[in-house]
Image: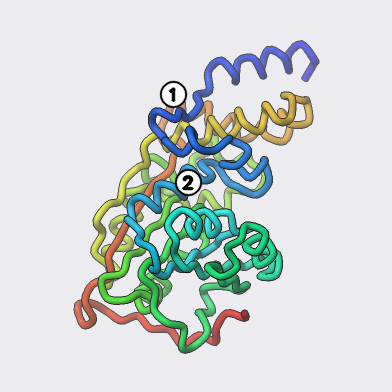
Amino acid sequence: MTTDERVVDAAGIRSTFRRLTPERHPILARCTRDVVYDEGRCMAPGGLVLVDAVGRYLNLRPGQSVLDLGCGRGQSSTFLAARYDVAVTSVDLWIPADERRSAASAAGLAHRITPWQGDIRRGLPPGTPPFDAIVCVQAFHTFGTSMALVRYLATLLKPGGALCFAQGCFSDECAAIPEPFCDSDGWQADYARYHSAPWWRAHVEASGVFAVEAGAEFEDGDVMWEDDVLYRGDRAGWSADYLSRAGWLIQHIRYGQTHRPRLTHLLLKAIRRAPGAGTSGALDIPGVQP
């Protein structure tokens, strides 16, 4: 790609890709995009916009307990603890608990956030008190396609407790990954588990232990992908290196502007049914390491 071609392509992206607006997503009026996207580090498309939406859907109240699954560096846990005055147990497979513990302390929230490192598929430590809510942002697809795991999550909730997750997905269900999406940096493994909002709704309902209250494509779910590209492109100065690294994703987004399926996001909220109303789904698993 020549310098001239790169400039034209960057200009084309900037003129056709859309940005999220504070009129539709109020958190953008309170926080800079650097805060929303963790200064371009580990936050996926949507960033704290999705976390804010999850919190509002749950109508969290001070003193409630929340399990934050796949929390990464813990931005979602910090946001929920600070905004809603809730006690958050943050679990992530890759980010050490000590790193998240230090971040919680720096934010003055060490008393509200309990970080653990481990794989939820191995379960939480025996005797963990039940939670009022379980949240998961941009990670549920990595473990949630397992029906046994969905049923296990219900055992971690108080009766009437809520599961709420938000994440990337396809706009339509596909029998196989569409050919345009097969050229990537390795995300095809994730694409294979993306599914569509109706698929996720039916999947959680089929567990027998949850009643889905809301489960649909998120407002501006497709715009989140475009906004993320624009934010990172602006930070990188639209350099040749950035365009090369993000080229595959830009092409996937462009495909979705005129074809289906397109990349978008979903938000689902489900309530744990009363004990005995469905399959318990308890798993014999050894536990997450504190």
Q: Quadrant of residue 36?
A: top right
Check residue 258 in the rendering and tell me which mark sits there, or answer none: 1
Rendering colour mode: rainbow
Q: Is residue 171 above or below residue 138?
A: above
Query: Between 124 and 174, which is closer to the camera in this rendering?
Result: 124
Check residue 235 in the rendering and tell me which mark sits there, or answer none: none
CA distance for labels 1 and 2: 19 Å
The reply to whether residue 274 is visible in this rendering is: yes
The number of numbered badges drawn on the structure is: 2
For the C terminus, the quadrant is bottom right
The reply to whether residue 208 is visible in this rendering is: no
Q: Looking at the image, tell me whether mark 1 or mark 2 is earlier in sequence order.
A: 2
Q: Secondary structure at mark 2?
A: strand
Report the side of 98 relative to 290 (left or right): right
Residue at the limit of the structure toward the front, as seen here: 108
Q: Name the residue at 55% across, 68% down.
A: 113
Query: Between 273 and 131, which is closer to the camera in this rendering?
Result: 131
Q: Name the residue at 36% across, 79% down.
A: 155
The kind of residue on which mark 1 rests is: Thr
Q: Quadrant of residue 232?
A: top right
Between circles 1 and 2, the one closer to the viewer is: 2
Q: Looking at the picture, how far across and down is residue 206, in whole percent?
A: 27, 66
Q: Is residue 87 above or below residue 22?
A: below
Q: Which residue is mark 2?
A: 168
Q: Looking at the picture, how far across and down is residue 2, in whole percent?
A: 80, 16
The kind of residue on which mark 2 rests is: Gly
Q: Is residue 7 above or below residue 237?
A: above
Q: Residues within 10 Å of mark 1 (few under 14, many from 20)?
A: few
Q: Looking at the picture, how far across and down is residue 117, in whole percent?
A: 63, 72
Q: Secondary structure at mark 1?
A: helix
Q: Name the residue at 67% across, 41% down.
A: 39
Query: Between 104 and 273, which is closer to the camera in this rendering?
Result: 104
